[in-house]
C-alpha cells in the first residue's frame, strides 16, 4: 500500500521554513501573503500496514516535541494547516521523477533500522499553505519564482498523482538494438545537421574527421561511438580554443598587426610555468589539480572549476554539484588528496536588477544568488570542508550567465602524486549510482544559452548528494593508505566516458556497461556511459587487491562495482549484455581531433574619460562606494558557510573584535599539530577587463599576491591558478580579448615569479534573447595559495591600537579607470591600473620581511574603492578611528589636473597596502622598507571618526566610522 | 584495562568534526580511536573498552528528515543497552553540535535514558529562527553542575555552526526541572554576561539554552564547538588579543578546559 505522512510545526513553534518563503514572496513585490506554513510530506510505498506507517512516523519522521502529524492512505486536498479557500492557497511541490532526492535514501535506511523491511520506495513533497488573498496570477508567479524550479520540480496537481507509480524512462533492454549512424557519403550540410540533432556540438571539420575515421575502418559508427567522441572532443573536456590555431589581429600605433598563435595555452600559461621552473612544483597541468610542496611529509594541491551553465538554469543544483565536482577533482588528484578548504567566487547581475528588464527565460539575479549560495553552503558544509575565501562581482551582463567558480585545496602525502593503471587492472566504479541525470553536461556547456535552454538541456541539471561523497572521501583515504589501487580519477563532465577514456588512454579498456550500478532500470547504454551522475570515482585495481577493497568499501556502506579491465589493446571496447557497442582507437579519441582555427581581433574599446569636479566633502562618496555591491560586506553569505570546520582556521574571512572585518587572504592550518599554514586568496576584476583585459590579468595576479602578503604568506611559495570565463570564442572580438588577457597572464606571472599549477576555461557564456546576444564581461579569476611558515605570525587587517602609525606602501597613480568610484558616476573611464612588477616585488619582499619580524600590527590591501575603502575598513573592523594626510601619500600623476583628492583616495592602483605599525617600531619598520615608496599618512585614533586632509590641507573627508560600517553592511542582507 | 584514558570518537556517514575532536582529546592526554558506527554494530569494537564516548559534529546521514534523527535511532535501538551501561558505569559522554542533536533525539539527554522504550524525547533541537545555517561566535555563561565544566571561566567564547540548534523543551515543567536540577550548563549571553536576543542567541533557543547535561552531570551536550576554540589561533581576533598584550595567554583557547576536565575526571575516578 501507499501511505502519506504529513508533518508540520506545532502551533506556537516558529515555522522557520515558512517564514523564509514568506520573505521570498515579499521580495517578488507581492504583499498580499500574510503567512506561509510548510507541511513536509513523506509518501511511503511498499508492503506496509497503516499501523507500521504510524510507527515509522512516531519513531523516525516526526519530532513530537515540536511537530504535529497525520497519516493517511487516501489523498485529499485539505491540509494539516488549513483547507484551500480564497484566502488560503495550497501548493504542493515534488521533485520530478529521476531527480536526486537525498532524503529518500536516508529515510529508507531509517525505516530499515526500525526493523521494517517492506517499504520499497519513499518520495517526499512539500506543501506550502499561503495565507492571504492572492490573485491567480500572483499565485502563478509565486509558484514559479519562489516555490519551485520547474526543471527539477513540479506542482502536484492532484495529491493522488503521487500515489501512482512512476516509470522512469524506457523498458529494460536486455538485448540492445545497437543503433548504427551512417556517415558515409553525407554532405557537410547533413553532417552539421546530425551534430546539431544529436546535441553533439561538433563542428564540420570534426564531423568530417570522424567520417574519415570510419570510412578507413570500412564500417558505420554506432550511436555510442559518436557520443564518446563528442564528449572527448568537447570544448569542456578538450579546451579546443586554447589549444587551437588563432589568427590574432590588433591595432598598435595606428597600424593593424597580425600574429599567429598555435596553442594559446602552451604559449602563455604553460610557458610561464616552464620559464619559472620552480623546484617546489611537484605536478602541474596534467592531473586533476596542480600539486606543490607543503612540508616534509605532505604536498598541497589546488583546483578551481566553474559551473556556470548549470547554475544559470538551476542555481542551487548547479552550484551544489559544482562544489561536489571540484572536491572530487581533489579526491582524484594523484592517488587521492584530503580537502582542507574551499574558495568560492561568484559573478552575478546586481540583486536589484529591474525584473521587467530580465531576458526571457533568465532567472532573477537575486534568486540566482540565493540559490547559488545555498548550493555551496549545502555541499561544502556537509562535506566538512571550510569555505574560507571568496569574492563577489556584480555587473549587468552576468544576467543570463552567472559565473560560479568553486575551488578546493587538498593535502596529499608526498610520494602519492603519481598514478598509472597497469595492464590487467580492473576498472572499478565506486560511490553514487548512475542515473539519467546530467546527460550532455560536457557538450551543453560548449554552447550558448537561450530561453530554450531550460527545456532542451534540463537533463544537464542535477542535485548533489554530499553525504555520499563524504562517505567516499572517508573510505577512499583508507584505501589509499593501504595501497589498494594503482590509479584513480573522478567522474566529472562526460561521466564514465571521460574518466575511463583518460585512465585508459595508454592501455585501452574493456567495459561491460551492464555492470554499472544504476539508480533505476531503463537507461540506454549510451546514457550509462555519458551520464554525469554525481559522487562517483573510478579506480584501477589489481585483481589481487579487489577483495580487500570490496570489504573496506562495504564496511562503510559505499557501493563499488567492477565494470571492466584495462586491457593493453589500446582500444576502447564497450559491451552491453555481451554485445559489442563500441570499439574505438584510444589514439583517435585523444589525438584525432582536427585543430581548429579561429580569428581573434583586439580593438581598444572607446570609453570616455568622465569630467566632473572633486567634491569638497568626499564623505558621501565614500559611503556610496562602501555600499556598492562590489565592495559591501559579504557577511551574510560568509556566515552561511561553515568556515571553521576541521579546526584549522587562523585568519578567518571575518576578523576584528566585531568578527565582521573583511579579511584579505585566509590562513588555515591543515595539520593541527603543526605551525605551518596555507594562505589562500583570489584576484578578480571584470570591470578592468572592459577597458583592457591585459591589465585586468596583471591586476588580478597582483591582487591575489598582495592579499597573501597582507596576511604574512611566504611570497617565494605562491602558486597561482587561472580561470577564464568568456563569451563565444567563435566571435573574433571575444577571442581577441581572451588572447590579450592570456598574454597578460604570461607576462605578469613570469614577472612576479608565480607559476600556474592548474587552470580552466569556460566559454560560450552568452545569452541570446530576441536575437540579441549578451556576453559576460571577459572575466579572469586568479586564485593563489602560499605557505605560511609560522601561523602564529599571521597578520589581520583590523586596526589594533589607538596611537599606531598608518603607512601606505606602494605608489598611487592617476589610474581610476574601472574603479568603483567612477562607477558611482555611471562611468568606466580609460586609465585602468597598470602593474609595475619590479616595484611591487621589492615592496612585497620588504613588507614580508617586516611582518616576519613582527613589526606590523595590521595590513590591508587597497583594491576596489582604493585607499579610502581600505582605510575605512581597517578602522571599522578594529572599532577605531583614524586621521590621514593625502599629501603624504606617494603619488604620481601624468597630468596636473589629475592631482586631486578623490584620485588619491579612490584610484585603484595596484601593489598598495595600508599598514599599521606600533610607534615603537617606527625606525625598524622604516629601515625594513628602505627603497620602497612609503608614506606615513596618519595615526589610528581612539574616537571612531575618520579625518582625511587633502592636498591643500583641506579637510576633504570627515565621517563617523559606525555610519560607514552601517552603509557597508546594509546592502547584501538576505 | 590500561592506565590510559581511552576516548571513543564515533563517526558515521556525514560526521565531519571527528578529527579536530580527536585532536582536542589527544592534546589533553587521552588515547583516542575514531571508529565507524558499523564497527560497533559488527562487534569489532566494544564501547565498554572506553572511558569517554564523544559524538562529534557534522551532518550524520545528511540530517535528512531531521538533524541527528537517524543516528539517534541507531544508538537507541542497536546500542541502547551499551549506552545505558556506559552511563551507569560512571563514564562520560559528550555530544557536540550534531552529537548534541543525536543525544537529545535518542532521549539520552536530558535523560534519564531507558533503553527499549521507544522515542522518549522531552526536549528538541530544531530549525534556527533565522531560517538559515550560521557560523558565528557566541559568549556562553557557564552554570549548573557538570564534571565537564569544572573550573571554566564564568563566561567562555566559542563558535556555533548550525542550522538546527534551537532548543525547545516539551513543556514548562520540563524546563523548570532542568533548571532545578542544574542541568542547564551553558546559556548564550552578550559579551557582558547579560541575556540578549539575536544574534547573541544565534538560533532562538528557549531561555537561551546552549548546552545541558543529564542529572549526573556526566553526559554533556552542547551546540557550540569547544574543539573549535581549543587553540588560541582559532579565536576570531587572536591577533587583536596579541596586540593588546598584557598577560600571556598561552596557546590554548576557552574550549580546551572542557576536554581537559573529561580526561582528568577519568584519571581521578576511573583509572
Image (cartoon, coloured by chain):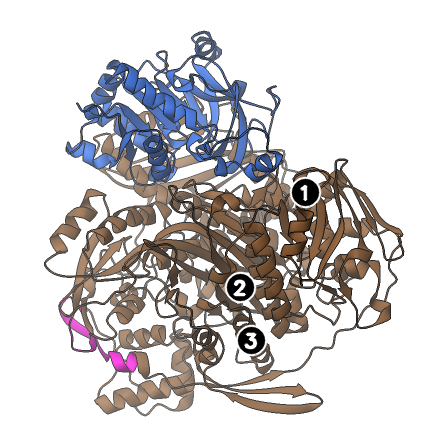
Earlier sequence position, callout 1 versus callout 2: 2
* Image location (x, y in percent) of residue B41: 18, 32
Q: Which residue is mark 1?
A: A920
* Residue A246 seen in this snapshot: yes
**Disc 2 residue crowd, few under 14, some 14–19, many 20+, Cα 10 Å:** many
Other-residue count near label 1 (Cα within 10 Å), few / some / many at <14 / 14–19 / ≥20: few
Residue most extreme to the top: B180
Q: Which region shows up in magenta?
A: A568-589
Supply the letter of whichever chain is brown.
A
- Taking depth in this image into account, of A276 and B105 the one nearest to the observer is A276
For the residues labelled 1 and 2, the Cα–Cα distance comes to 37 Å
Task: Name the residue: 30% across, 79% down.
Answer: A589
| Colour in which the image shows chain B | blue
Secondary structure beneath label 1: helix
Label 2 and label 3: CA atoms lie apart by 14 Å
Q: Position of residue A859 (x, y in %)?
A: 63, 50
How many numbered dots are placed on residues in this image? 3
Residue under numbered circle 2: A782
Amino acid at each position: 500500500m501507499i501511505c502519506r505522512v504529513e508533518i508540520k510545526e506545532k502551533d506556537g513553534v516558529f515555522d522557520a521554513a515558512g517564514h523564509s518563503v514568506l520573505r521570498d514572496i515579499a521580495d517578488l513585490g507581492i504583499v498580499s501573503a500574510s503567512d506561509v506554513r510548510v507541511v513536509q510530506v513523506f509518501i511511503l510505498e511498499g508492503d506496509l500496514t497503516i499501523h507500521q506507517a504510524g510507527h515509522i512516523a512516531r519513531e523516525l519522521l516526526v519530532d513530537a516535541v515540536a511537530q504535529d502529524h497525520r497519516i493517511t492512505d487516501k489523498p485529499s486536498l485539505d491540509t494539516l494547516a488549513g483547507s484551500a479557500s480564497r484566502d488560503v492557497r495550497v501548493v504542493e511541490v515534488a521533485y520530478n521523477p529521476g531527480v536526486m532526492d537525498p532524503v529518500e535514501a536516508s529515510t529508507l535506511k531509517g525505516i530499515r533500522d526500525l526493523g521494517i523491511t517492506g517499504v520499497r520506495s519513499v518520495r517526499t513533497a512539500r506543501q506550502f499553505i499561503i495565507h492571504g488573498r492572492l490573485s491567480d496570477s500572483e499565485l502563478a508567479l509565486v509558484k514559479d519564482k519562489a516555490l519551485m524550479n520547474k526543471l527539477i520540480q513540479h506542482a502536484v496537481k492532484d495529491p493522488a498523482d503521487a500515489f501512482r507509480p512512476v516509470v522512469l524512462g524506457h523498458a529494460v533492454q536486455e538485448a540492445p538494438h545497437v543503433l548504427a549512424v551512417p556517415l558515409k557519403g553525407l554532405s557537410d550540410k547533413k553532417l552539421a545537421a546530425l551534430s546539431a540533432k544529436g546535441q553533439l556540438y561538433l563542428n564540420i571539420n570534426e564531423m568530417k574527421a570522424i567520417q574519415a575515421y570510419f570510412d578507413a575502418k570500412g564500417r558505420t559508427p554506432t550511436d555510442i561511438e559518436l557520443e564518446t567522441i563528442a564528449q572527448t572532443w568537447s570544448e569542456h573536456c578538450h579546451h579546443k580554443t586554447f589549444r587551437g590555431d588563432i589568427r590574432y589581429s590588433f591595432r598598435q600605433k595606428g597600424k593593424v598587426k597580425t600574429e599567429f598563435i598555435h596553442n594559446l595555452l602552451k604559449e602563455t600559461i604553460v610557458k610561464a610555468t616552464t620559464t619559472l621552473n620552480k623546484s617546489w612544483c611537484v605536478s602541474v597541468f596534467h592531473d586533476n589539480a596542480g600539486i606543490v610542496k607543503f612540508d616534509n611529509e605532505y604536498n598541497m594541491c589546488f583546483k578551481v572549476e566553474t559551473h556556470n551553465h548549470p547554475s544559470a538554469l538551476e542555481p542551487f543544483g548547479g552550484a551544489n554539484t559544482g562544489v561536489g565536482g571540484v572536491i572530487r577533482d581533489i579526491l582524484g588528484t594523484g592517488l587521492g588528496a584530503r580537502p582542507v578548504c574551499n574558495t568560492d567566487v561568484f559573478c552575478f547581475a546586481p540583486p536589484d536588477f529591474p525584473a521587467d528588464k530580465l531576458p526571457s527565460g533568465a532567472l532573477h539575479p537575486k534568486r540566482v544568488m540565493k540559490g547559488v549560495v545555498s548550493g555551496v553552503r549545502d555541499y561544502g558544509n556537509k562535506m566538512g570542508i571550510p569555505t574560507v575565501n571568496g569574492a563577489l562581482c556584480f555587473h549587468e551582463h552576468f544576467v543570463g550567465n552567472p559565473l560560479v567558480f568553486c575551488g578546493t585545496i587538498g593535502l596529499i602525502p608526498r610520494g602519492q602524486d603519481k598514478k598509472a593503471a597497469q595492464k590487467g587492472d580492473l576498472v572499478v566504479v565506486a560511490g553514487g549510482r548512475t542515473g539519467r541525470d546530467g546527460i550532455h553536461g560536457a557538450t551543453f556547456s560548449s554552447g550558448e544559452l537561450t530561453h530554450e535552454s531550460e527545456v532542451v538541456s534540463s537533463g544537464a541539471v542535477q542535485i548533489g548528494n554530499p553525504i555520499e561523497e563524504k562517505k567516499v572521501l572517508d573510505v577512499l583515504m583508507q584505501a589509499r593508505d593501504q595501497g589498494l589501487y594503482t590509479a584513480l580519477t573522478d567522474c566529472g563532465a562526460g561521466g564514465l566516458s571521460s574518466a575511463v577514456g583518460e585512465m585508459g588512454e595508454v592501455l585501452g579498456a574493456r567495459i561491460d556497461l551492464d555492470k554499472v550500478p544504476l539508480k533505476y532500470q531503463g537507461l540506454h547504454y549510451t546514457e550509462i556511459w555519458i551520464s554525469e551522475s554525481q559522487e562517483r570515482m573510478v579506480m584501477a585495481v589489481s585483481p589481487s587487491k579487489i577483495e580487500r577493497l570490496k570489504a573496506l568499501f562495504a564496511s562503510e556502506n559505499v557501493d563499488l562495482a567492477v565494470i571492466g579491465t584495462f586491457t593493453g589493446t589500446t582500444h576502447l571496447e564497450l559491451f552491453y549484455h555481451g554485445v559489442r557497442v563500441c570499439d574505438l582507437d584510444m589514439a583517435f579519441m585523444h589525438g584525432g581531433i582536427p585543430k581548429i582555427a579561429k580569428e581573434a581581433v583586439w580593438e581598444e574599446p572607446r570609453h570616455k574619460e568622465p569630467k566632473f569636479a572633486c567634491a569638497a566633502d568626499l564623505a558621501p562618496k565614500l559611503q556610496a562606494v562602501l555600499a556598492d555591491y562590489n565592495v559591501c560586506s559579504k557577511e551574510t553569505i560568509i556566515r552561511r558557510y561553515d568556515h571553521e570546520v576541521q579546526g584549522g582556521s587562523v585568519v578567518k574571512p571575518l576578523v576584528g573584535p566585531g568578527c565582521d572585518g573583511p579579511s584579505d587572504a585566509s590562513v588555515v592550518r591543515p595539520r593541527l599539530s603543526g605551525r605551518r599554514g596555507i594562505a589562500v586568496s583570489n584576484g578578480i576584476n571584470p570591470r578592468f577587463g572592459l577597458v583592457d583585459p591585459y591589465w585586468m590579468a596583471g591586476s588580478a595576479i597582483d591582487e591575489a599576491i598582495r592579499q597573501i602578503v597582507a596576511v604574512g604568506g611566504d611570497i617565494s611559495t605562491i602558486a597561482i591558478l587561472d580561470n577564464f570565463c568568456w563569451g563565444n570564442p567563435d566571435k573574433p572580438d571575444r577571442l581577441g580579448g581572451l588572447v590579450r588577457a592570456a598574454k597578460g597572464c604570461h607576462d605578469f606571472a613570469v614577472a612576479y615569479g608565480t607559476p600556474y599549477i592548474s587552470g580552466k576555461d569556460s566559454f560560450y557564456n552568452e545569452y541570446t534573447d530576441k536575437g540579441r546576444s549578451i556576453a559576460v564581461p571577459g572575466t579572469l579569476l586568479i586564485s593563489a595559495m602560499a605557505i605560511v611558515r609560522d601561523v602564529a605570525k599571521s597578520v589581520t587587517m583590523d586596526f589594533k591600537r589607538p596611537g599606531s602609525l598608518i603607512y601606505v606602501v606602494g605608489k598611487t597613480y592617476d589610474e581610476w579607470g574601472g574603479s568603483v568610484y567612477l562607477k558611482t558616476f555611471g562611468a568606466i573611464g580609460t586609465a585602468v591600473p597598470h602593474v609595475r612588477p619590479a616595484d611591487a616585488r621589492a615592496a612585497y619582499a620588504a613588507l614580508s620581511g617586516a611582518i616576519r619580524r613582527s613589526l606590523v600590527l595590521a595590513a590591508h590591501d587597497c583594491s576596489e574603492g582604493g585607499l579610502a575603502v581600505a582605510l575605512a575598513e581597517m578602522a571599522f573592523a578594529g572599532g577605531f578611528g583614524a586621521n590621514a594626510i593625502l599629501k603624504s601619500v606617494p603619488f604620481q600623476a601624468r597630468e596636473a589636473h589629475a592631482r586631486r583628492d578623490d584620485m588619491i583616495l579612490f584610484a585603484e592602483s595596484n601593489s598598495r597596502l595600508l599598514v599599521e605599525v606600533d610607534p615603537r617600531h617606527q625606525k625598524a619598520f622604516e629601515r625594513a622598507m628602505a627603497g620602497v615608496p612609503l608614506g606615513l599618512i596618519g595615526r589610528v585614533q581612539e574616537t571612531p571618526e575618520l579625518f582625511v586632509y587633502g592636498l591643500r590641507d583641506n579637510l576633504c573627508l570627515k565621517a563617523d566610522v559606525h555610519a560607514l560600517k552601517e552603509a557597508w553592511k546594509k546592502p547584501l542582507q538576505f | 584495562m590500561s592506565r590510559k584514558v581511552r576516548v571513543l570518537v564515533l563517526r558515521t556517514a556525514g560526521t565531519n568534526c571527528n578529527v579536530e575532536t580527536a585532536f582536542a582529546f589527544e592534546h589533553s592526554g587521552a588515547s583516542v580511536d575514531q571508529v565507524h558506527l558499523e564497527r560497533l554494530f559488527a562487534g569489532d569494537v566494544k564501547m565498554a573498552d572506553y572511558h569517554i564516548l564523544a559524538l562529534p559534529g557534522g551532518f550524520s546521514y545528511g540530517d535528512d528528515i531531521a538533524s541527528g534523527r537517524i543516528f539517534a535511532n541507531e544508538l537507541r535501538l542497536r546500542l541502547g543497552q551499551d549506552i545505558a551501561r556506559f552511563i551507569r558505569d560512571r563514564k562520560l559522554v559528550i555530544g557536540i553540535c550534531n552529537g548534541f542533536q543525536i543525544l537529545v533525539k535518542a532521549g539520552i539527554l536530558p535523560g534519564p535514558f531507558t533503553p527499549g522504550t521507544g522515542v522518549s524525547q522531552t526536549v528538541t533541537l530544531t530549525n534556527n529562527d533565522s531560517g538559515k545555517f550560521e557560523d558565528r561566535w557566541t559568549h556562553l555563561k557557564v552554570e549548573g553542575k557538570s564534571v565537564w565544566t569544572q573550573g571554566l571561566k564564568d563566561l567562555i567564547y566559542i563558535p556555533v555552526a548550525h542550522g538546527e540548534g534551537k532548543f525547545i523543551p516539551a513543556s514548562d515543567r520540563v524546563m523548570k526541572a532542568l533548571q532545578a536540577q542544574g542541568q542547564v550548563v551553558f546559556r548564550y549571553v552578550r559579551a557582558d554576561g547579560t541575556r540578549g536576543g539575536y544574534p547573541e542567541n544565534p538560533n532562538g533557543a528557549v531561555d537561551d539554552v546552549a548546552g545541558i547535561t543529564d542529572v549526573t552531570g556526566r553526559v554533556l551536550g552542547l551546540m557550540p564547538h569547544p574543539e573549535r576554540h581549543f587553540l588560541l589561533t582559532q579565536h576570531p581576533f587572536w591577533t587583536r588579543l596579541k596586540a593588546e598584550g598584557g598577560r600571556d595567554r598561552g596557546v590554548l583557547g576557552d574550549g580546551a578546559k572542557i576536554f581537559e576536565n573529561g580526561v582528568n575526571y577519568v584519571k581521578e575516578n576511573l583509572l
